[in-house]
Image: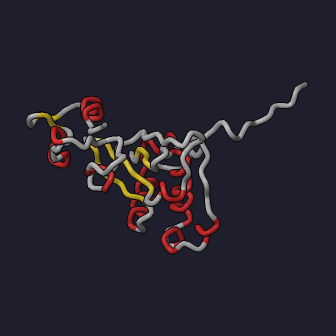
Amino acid sequence: MAESTIELWDGIYRRIYAAALRGKRINSVSLEAEAAFWRLHLVADDYGGFDADPLSLRVTAFRKRPEVTEPQIQKWLKELGESKLIQVYPVCEDTFGTIIDFIHFQPAGKNGRRVRKYPPPVHSGESKGIQGNPYRRNNKNNNKNINNNRGRVGGVKKSRNQCWRSWPRS
């Protein structure tokens, strides 16, 4: 019978640094919130973005942990946010999050490119048209205030799919 092997280079990998053991922010949260933080690394996109809906996180990050509940996840997200480890923000009617300083510590993939699956926070530098932002065009025709227009067209609320498709991209 042939031995099966696991190719570690085929998947997405994340680096965890030993300095995390000494970090003030990570050591200021409970052990449960810290475990949730490392699970968020596994479900985050290449920019540190993730779907912060507790139900979605329970299904993706805690799939094999039936004892984890949505209120617990909500509590951990709040704790991580208060410690400035993550940022949770609304987009249309959905809730997304980003791991703070994720890009600084995580390398891009094999080809050097990053893939964004979730929108960035609107008030971050990325979303204001800084060069290289895949979600905002740097032209005069796209200088709308997306904070006020998110989720609405002419004052009419859009569906989630319409909102996501209309999010500014280059």
Residue beneath the point at 36% across and 54% down: 88
Residue 88 to residue 56: above or below: below
Along the viewing direction, whichever of 138 and 6 lies nearer the viewer = 138
Q: For the view shown, which residue lies furthest in the left direction?
A: 154
Left or right: 73 with respect to 122?
right
Q: Position of residue 111 (x, y in %)?
A: 57, 39
Residue 3 to residue 63: above or below: above
Residue beneath the point at 31% across and 37% down: 170
Q: Position of residue 121 (x, y in %)?
A: 32, 51
Residue beneath the point at 51% across and 61% down: 33
So how many labels did they put on this image?
0
Along the viewing direction, whichever of 63 and 150 lies nearer the viewer = 150
Q: For the view shown, which residue lies furthest in the right direction?
A: 1
Determine the image quadrant of residue 53: top left
Determine the image quadrant of residue 15: bottom right
Residue beneath the point at 25% across and 41% down: 92
Along the viewing direction, whichever of 44 and 159 lies nearer the viewer = 44
Q: Position of residue 67 (x, y in %)?
A: 55, 49
Left or right: 48 with respect to 155?
right
Q: Position of residue 47 (x, y in %)?
A: 45, 48
Left or right: 2 with respect to 169?
right
Along the viewing direction, whichever of 144 and 95 lies nearer the viewer = 144
The quadrant the N terminus occupies is top right
